Image (tube, rainbow, N blue to C red):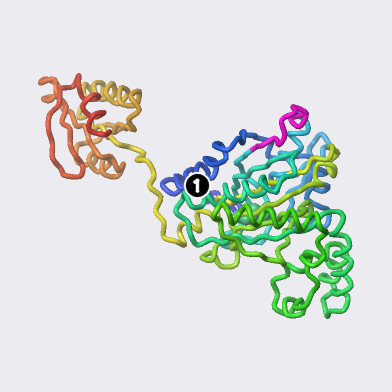
Amino acid sequence: MTIFQAPKGTYDLIPPDSAKYLAVREAIAAPLRNSGYGYVETPGFENVELFARGVGESTDIVTKEMYAFETKGGDRLALRPEGTASVLRAALEASLHKSGNLPVKLWYSGSYYRYERPQKGRYRHFSQVGAEAIGAEDPALDTELIVLADQAYRSLGLSGFRILLNSLGDKECRPVYREALQGFLRGLDLDEDTRHRAGVNPLRVLDDKRESVRKQLVGAPLLRDHLCDACKAYHEEVRELLTAAGVPFEDDEKLVRGLDYYTRTTFEFVHDGLGSQSAVGGGGRYDGLSEMIGGPALPSVGWALGVDRTVLALEAEGIELRLPASTSVFAVPLGEEARRALFAVVTGLRRAGVAADLCYGGKGLKSAMKSAHRSGARYALVAGERDLAEGVVQLKDMESGEQVPVALGSAVEELGARLV
Ligand code: AMP
């Protein structure tokens, strides 16, 4: 029988590379935990209607990329293609917004699913860490989120990313702009599909990557010139706060995102070493989403950073993360009595917080020492019958090759002292 393979567009995280993914998730979460964001976890699937209404009926995510299915019980569900709609749904369901303590700040980490054409950096199952600040309209909050994402990337050592910033206006000024843009698009030579898109979601046409479309878009009306005074002032304040925080950004008047719920502040983090799938993260304000999914008016802002692409960005910059050693001490018992004695030492080391492992399977010295090397351990503890008769174990420094006997009873202490 042939061995099963991971489904198309997916891949497994396996050691040692999987450690990088954990470290990236941790690095993104750390600044959030430190800034008042509480952890939230929602199901991997939701009622399909939540995404249809939340993300937008006309978006690629909903029309083409969603894994939607009907259960045996007749429920229409979908694997989550993104996190914001679910997190807002959970916050509303638990009435977190009624606690009187707005904004409700939440962060999450998990798997997302989109039926996309797979390529490097674009998968059908991928992983994101995200943050949402629900129920406050304050340019400082938008800025906080951008600053925290910047801090997360920098803490990983990344420097080759740029922050693109735009404002998508609000329910006052966007409809006016939308019409102006539609008028402009009607005069262009566009294919059937694109003309349809111009009808349902003209802003997304601005995001078209094809050269034939791009060159016609020169001279398109820009939202910047249509923003109402309130949106203009809000956006200006975000820009000033970012500048004061020392976070560089680029104004990108054509930045729109693939989800319908965004209003006002919109941003994307792009990495120049990634080729066509260059967006490592993105987000923005979504003041109308709560009402779209049946909640009260709750202006909110959030982002999601892609873990897979962040790992690719690290590789593109040649950054090796300094990961904690998975094994500091590797114990090699030669014989049954030694196994008993070293098992006790390893247990003691682990209880003392030292990363330790034991050679299993009754291997001989040579192959056991190979395992010790492969484990990456700084020290090996080797014991045979003669050592035990003398009440010692051999402590081998794997870097220098030096070996000294230490009393069995003080091995945990000795190693603890050496490893600080
Ligand atoms: P989005 O919700 O589309 O803005 O996605 C936010 C981030 O998730 C992106 O910037 C990517 O880093 C990541 N992402 C989105 N879709 C995929 C995918 N198909 N494969 C890998 N990463 C993705």
The quarter of the picture where residue 61 lies is bottom right
Quadrant location, the C terminus: top left
Residue 74 lies, in percent from the top left, at: 84, 37
Residue drawn at the location 47% of the way across and 49% of the way down: 155
Task: Compare residues 5 and 379 and report the one nearer the observer.
Answer: 379
Assess whether residue 393 is covered by the magenta stretch: no
Q: Secondary structure at mark 1?
A: helix
Asked if residue 5 can be seen in this view, the reply is no
Residue 347 lies, in percent from the top left, at: 32, 23
Residue 310 lies, in percent from the top left, at: 53, 54
Name the quadrant where ligand 1 sits: bottom right
Q: Is residue 361 left or right of residue 59?
A: left
Q: Amino acid at mark 1?
A: Val
Residue drawn at the location 70% of the way across and 52% of the way down: 284
Residue 267 lies, in percent from the top left, at: 66, 57
Assess whether residue 96 is covered by the magenta stretch: yes
Circle count:
1
> Disc 1 marks which residue?
24
Task: Compare residues 103 and 85 and report the one nearer the observer.
Answer: 103
Asked if disc 1 is less than 8 Å from ligand 1, the answer is: no
Residue drawn at the location 32% of the way across and 30% of the way down: 354
Residue drawn at the location 81% of the way across and 72% of the way down: 221
What crowding class fits label 1: few (fewer than 14 Cα within 10 Å), some (14-19), or many (20 or more)? many
Where are the magenta residues, as a range?
Answer: 95-106
Asked if residue 301 can be seen in this view, the reply is yes
Task: Compare residues 224 and 395 and report the one nearer the observer.
Answer: 224
